[in-house]
Image (spheres, rainbow, N blue to C red):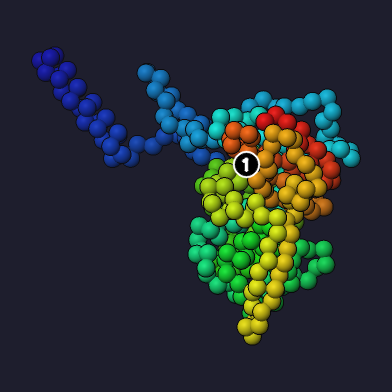
Amino acid sequence: MRCINRQIAVCLTAVILTIVLSGCGELSYGLPYDLNNSKSAYQFDTQNERECAQAFASNLCIPGEESGDENETAFGPDSYSAAMLFDLKGRKTLYCKSPYERLYPASMTKVLTAIVAMENCDMDRVLVADESCVLTANDVQKIKLKPGDTMTLDQALHILLIYSANDVANLIAVNVAGSVDAFAEMMNEEAVALGATNSHFMNPSGLHDENHYTTAYDMYLIFNKAISFGKFIEIISMTDYSTVYHDSAGADITVECETTNRYLKGQYPPPAAANVIGGKTGTTQAAGTCLVLLTKDPSDNSYISVVMNAQNVDVLYTKMNSMLELL
């Protein structure tokens, strides 16, 4: 009888395990995911055989110990808030300062804008400007779009990423999502999907909003996704761009613009071993000066580097060069 009971117990155990492992049943686990928690579980170990599940970030660089030197300052005329350098082939973080500090990204935001646009819209789609594309502030980078102006997404992305036009960011947003607010929701959904969970975006341009922020590490995650698009790399490597779009009556409007990247302009030479491909700048009074950059070494290995909230362009490019010396 005892033997029979044991056989019954074994069978019942097998049935229960089959139900649980097959996803049937209503067994729940106390492992909630919290977007507001900056810590993430990168792998799970089994209790018995120490087998590891595949980590979602297994193909990404993970921040390690903070880097630093005697000359670094957190405040003053030579200060910056965060800086990171990532070796994409080796999946290593070569330099790390304040990876999770929430900071304003300014126009680096447009990297995410480009991702959402490329994922949801054809390059030859004709975009039509509305009133939300009209920006009147004198200190805002723009091409002075007016309601009824039209251009393709391909044209818009070039102007967005090379010249950093904020009105063109709105043009993309309203045509892809119907409104700037709806597009911001798509941006936040994309950021979460990329693991950039310490970020929140309020607009497609990066114009200042206290609820619009990211981190140096999240900026790496976003930029790393962007460079998976050949079109994105093609655009950010260009020094200038000229095109013709149309007004509401169909008349031609010519726009010519230069890159905001001072490496590509030749104003700040990088270290000899660093071949700067391109990147995205960002500048506002609240954000300071920022740059996320794609660089290759003499062996054609790729690197992403980020500097945020530098006090001025000299500090920005000096700090960026000091990291690129590590290539």
Residue 228 relative to residue 303: left or right: left
In this figure, what is the number of numbered marks? 1
Location of residue 107 (image quadrant): bottom right
Q: Nearer the viewer, residue 226 or 38?
A: 226
Q: Is residue 38 visible?
A: no
Horizontal and vertical percent position of residue 124: 52, 68
Residue 254 relative to residue 224: left or right: right
Q: Is residue 279 visible?
A: yes
**Considering the image in quadrants, where does the N terminus appear?**
top left
**Considering the image in quadrants, where does the C terminus appear?**
top right
Is residue 147 depicted above or below 121 in this figure? below
- Type of amino acid at the residue the image marks with label 1: Tyr
Q: Secondary structure at mark 1?
A: helix
- At horizontal 59% and vertical 57% (from top left) the residue drawn is 114
Q: Nearer the viewer, residue 124 or 2?
A: 124
Horizontal and vertical percent position of residue 109: 66, 53
